[in-house]
Image (cartoon, coloured by chain):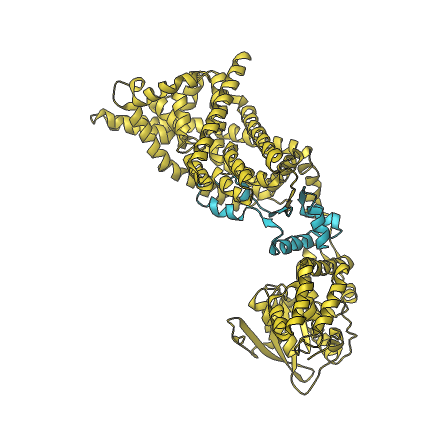
Amino acid sequence: MSTCHTVQADAARPQVAERAVLVALAGQPNVGKSTLFNLLTGLNQHVGNWPGKTVERKEGLFTLNGATCRLVDLPGTYSLTANSAEEVIAREFIIRERPDVVIALVDAAILERSLYLVAELISLPAPVIVALNMMDVARQEGVQIEPEVLEAALGVPVVPMVATRREGVQKLLETVDRVIRGEFPYRPRPPQVRADHQEILEEIRGLIAGHVPEPYPCEWVALKLLEGDREITRMMQERLPPEQWEAVHQVLRAHDDALVAVASGRYEWIGRMVRAAVTRPRAGQIGLTERLDRWATHPFWGLVVLAGILGLVFWLTYAVGTPLQDLLDRYGISVLADLARRGLLGRAAWLADLVADGVIGGVGAMLTFLPILVIFFAVMGILEDVGYLARAAYVMDGFMHLMGLHGKSFLPLFLGFGCNVPAVLGTRVIESRRARLLTLLLAPLVPCTARMAVIAFLAPAFFGPAATLVSWGLILLALVVMALSGVLINRTLFRGQRAAFIMELPLYHLPNWRTIGLLVWQRSLAFVRKAGTLILAVSVGVWALSTFPGGGVEESFLAQLGRWLEPAGRLMGMDWRLVVALLTGFVAKENAIATLGVLFGMGGGEGLARVLASAYPASTALAFLVAEMLFIPCIATVGAIRQETGSWGWTLFDVGLLLVLSFLGGAGVYQLARLAGL
Amino acid sequence: MLNRLLELLRTGDTHRVSDLARRLGTTPQLVEMMLEELERMGKLKPVGERCVEECKACPLAGACAAGMKGRAWTWEEEA
């Protein structure tokens, strides 16, 4: 049994005995432990497993001033809490075997991360030497470390080195020798528990004194109990008399924030060490990022920058993509449809119609859109790769907070910009049933990528040079609707609750063209696959409904259905074709384009974009785009809503609600546009 | 330091790691470590991880916020 004496007193005493000197090598994974181990032991090493574990144990021998040293490579760990087998092995080895020296190998380039382990190591009963590895990498990144200052702050020897170049290895060995001989004044300054928990630690120490089994240091055990360490708690529960354990348990239960207090002390300590010994550059990449972020993440100017960048994305997409789309339309798809008709001459007329109008008309209309999509994906990819998209999210979240929106309802809504399905699933983070229900019912109002694709195709077709402005306005409309919905949820359901959102923004850097190329390729391929399956099936279906029972498209089943709905469409300035196009978007949003392709016939020699532009006035086009933006989501999203609400009633209510919003939005915009003379 | 970080989060605002570091008088690296620690303690939730999984099935997951670089966490006031 031990009493509570100080750990450092033992650690400072040199233990050079008759046995071989025992040296332990500790450190995080990937800090160069294996390199140093191989450098020191050469071929004098063997590999096995730690007793009873599947964790690899490496051991080797080396000679130091004529003395044989046994070097044990401890498993790579980030801390010494009993979270993993590796962490338990490392700390048990140091406590039970009491090595003469522990070399703590740390990565100088990420000193903070490595110091957490050092903070725990120097609280154990074995002298520690900090080997500052990868000094070259740290220098390259502009991080200046003063080893002497760090040594003074830590109270343990610090040796700078570059293991891969053998730099500093000799100095390390000399230091090991000095520590073993007791020539180094070893006075470690371990972190202290936060001041308001010092007394509690003392109380626990007093309660367990005399009951801590050898060779565990009492002070360390008390600290681990305060941290809630599972292994140590179990050990002490078995060792202490029941009434004594109950007293310890009472103290721990009354201070369930102790883990924060202990960890807080360690972070405070790391902060002090870094402040003392590390200088980081203010110029270069970090400086550039900070300068750009002064604008890009400013509460007001950040929004202006975001709006400008969005406008630029659409302008670029249309300026480069639309002429390409036009060419593909005129000389690709239309020609292909004519060729198909000629090739099928003499066969059944319906077959030529199916191939030319159904397949080439529907899927072809989608494929002409590929250049626009490729450019859109590329521009978004560049923004993502240079690190801007994360800023866009940050600025938007700040904006939503300004409006009093709860972060919990904002996050799922924000995810909806990619796809509404994860937005609906993302509402699982909201515990309140009512709040979750409202958020997921409103999630489809966020314009997903597929809806944006429809806008990207139709806006230049209808509005030519003004397409950028129209697209920008449509997104603004969607954001306003989303924000108002969120504010409504917030005011009614989240009143008084607070939530924070923390973001780690990457440094700006030049784009990696290979990454962007790969990203554009994968996304474009996925789009083409979708066009070849789901959109093809719907196109054929639309063609069949628009062809049968015969007598032309105006007499078709589809026309009959469309005409039945036309009165509602008229209020938005739409004929039955646009109403049907809107409806087929239910299967997948892009089908709206494919349906228009089938209904207006791609084989006529004139591109779909031009046909549409001449068929409808601007007021109708604007109403259609607004209705499309607010219309019921695709079937996959509706399925997700059914799954998450667990109710057909709520699902149908949402579909109905969105239909009404879409209709009111479309009709309102149409009437306003008419009043404005469009 | 961890409790000071929690105090800042209790304001319920949107924070950048670099801003938190400045306000705590430390480095962004240390703040990241503390956020990871708070995540392990269950006080913070990482954002977007599950969505990345869900997005695998979506052919048009291109501009999804969950796919962006950088990490994000949420903190919610305990009831």
Residue A435 is drawn in which quadrant?
Answer: top right
User: Residue at 64% across / 68% down in the picture?
Assistant: A163
User: Which residue is farthest bottom?
Assistant: A18
Report which colour depicts chain A: yellow
User: Which residue is farthest front?
Assistant: A243
Q: Position of residue A507 (x, y in %)?
A: 64, 46
Q: Nearer the viewer, residue A507 or B46?
A: B46
Q: Nearer the viewer, residue A329 or A215?
A: A215
Report which colour depicts chain B: cyan
Quadrant in which the N terminus of chain A is drawn? bottom right
Asked whether residue A88 is in view, the answer is yes
User: Residue at 73% across / 60% down in the picture?
Assistant: A265
Residue A206 sits above or below residue B23 on the image: below
The answer to whether A500 appears left or right of A187 in the picture is left
Q: Position of residue A493 (x, y in %)?
A: 59, 37
User: Residue at 43% across / 23% down in the picture?
Assistant: A609
Residue A360 sits above or below residue A427 on the image: above
Q: Position of residue A15 (x, y in %)?
A: 71, 82
